[in-house]
Image (cartoon, helix red, strand yellow):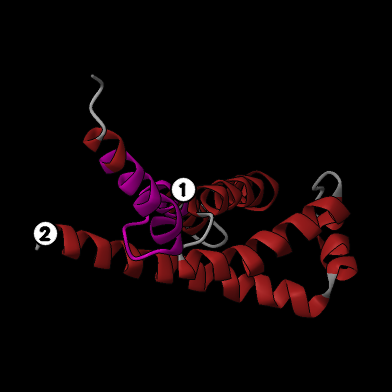
């Protein structure tokens, strides 16, 4: 029972984190890579076109993958990188709290990273990879060396 509750709460956490990243990503998607890169450049973010394309990819495609539970560790790392970039490039000067502070970015990046490596069993990753490994281990233990 407790394991099921853990899986449900991990799913709810993934949905919450992915929804916020997806909302921000769709804004950038609508603006386009060029406009997003121009905004990044005005903030002093290095390689603004690469950063814009990476951020849009992580926030849109990564969030969809995060919701369905696919490539969770990869997306979690992507969220951490985007969060670190947003903190250093945009929010750091404002401090932790207050107008423009980095508290939300910090929480989202940390939660995304944690859920990326602990996303629960209600995920495609678990269905496709972990269940297969478990079946293989059970098969190996049934074969006893002579």
- Disc number at residue 43? none
- Disc number at residue 2? 2
- Label 1 neighbour load within 10 Å: few <14, some 14-19, many 20+: many
- In the rendered image, residue 134 lying in the magenta stretch gets the answer yes
Taking the spot 59% from the left edge, 76% from the top edge, the residue there is 23
Instruction: For marks 1 and 2, give the CA distance.
Output: 23 Å
Name the residue tied to disc 1.
Answer: 113
Looking at the image, is 48 positioned above or below residue 30? above
- In the rendered image, residue 142 lying in the magenta stretch gets the answer no
Q: Quadrant of the C terminus?
A: top left
Q: Nearer the viewer, residue 95 or 36?
A: 36
Taking the spot 46% from the left edge, 48% from the top edge, the residue there is 113
Mark closest to the chain's N terminus, 1 or 2: 2
Taking the spot 33% from the left edge, 70% from the top edge, the residue there is 12
- Label 2 neighbour load within 10 Å: few <14, some 14-19, many 20+: few
Question: In the visual, does 93 lie left or right of 111?
Answer: right
Q: Nearer the viewer, residue 141 or 134?
A: 141
Taking the spot 65% from the left edge, 69% from the top edge, the residue there is 60
Looking at the image, is 22 positioned above or below residue 38? below
Q: Secondary structure at mark 2?
A: helix
The stretch of residues the image draws in magenta is 111-138
């Amino acid at each position: 029972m407790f394991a099921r509750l853990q899986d449900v709460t991990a799913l709810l956490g993934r949905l919450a984190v992915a929804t916020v990243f997806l909302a921000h990503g769709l804004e950038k998607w609508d603006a386009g890579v060029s406009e997003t890169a121009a905004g990044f450049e005005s903030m002093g973010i290095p390689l603004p076109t690469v950063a814009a394309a990476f951020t849009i990819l992580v926030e849109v495609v990564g969030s969809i993958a995060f919701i369905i539970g696919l490539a969770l560790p990869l997306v979690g790392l992507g969220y951490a990188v985007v969060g670190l970039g947003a903190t250093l490039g945009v929010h750091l000067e404002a401090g932790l709290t207050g107008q423009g502070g980095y508290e939300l970015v910090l929480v989202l990046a940390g939660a995304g990273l944690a859920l990326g490596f602990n996303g629960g069993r209600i995920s495609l990753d678990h269905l496709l990879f972990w269940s297969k490994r478990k079946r293989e281990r059970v098969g190996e233990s049934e074969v006893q060396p002579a």
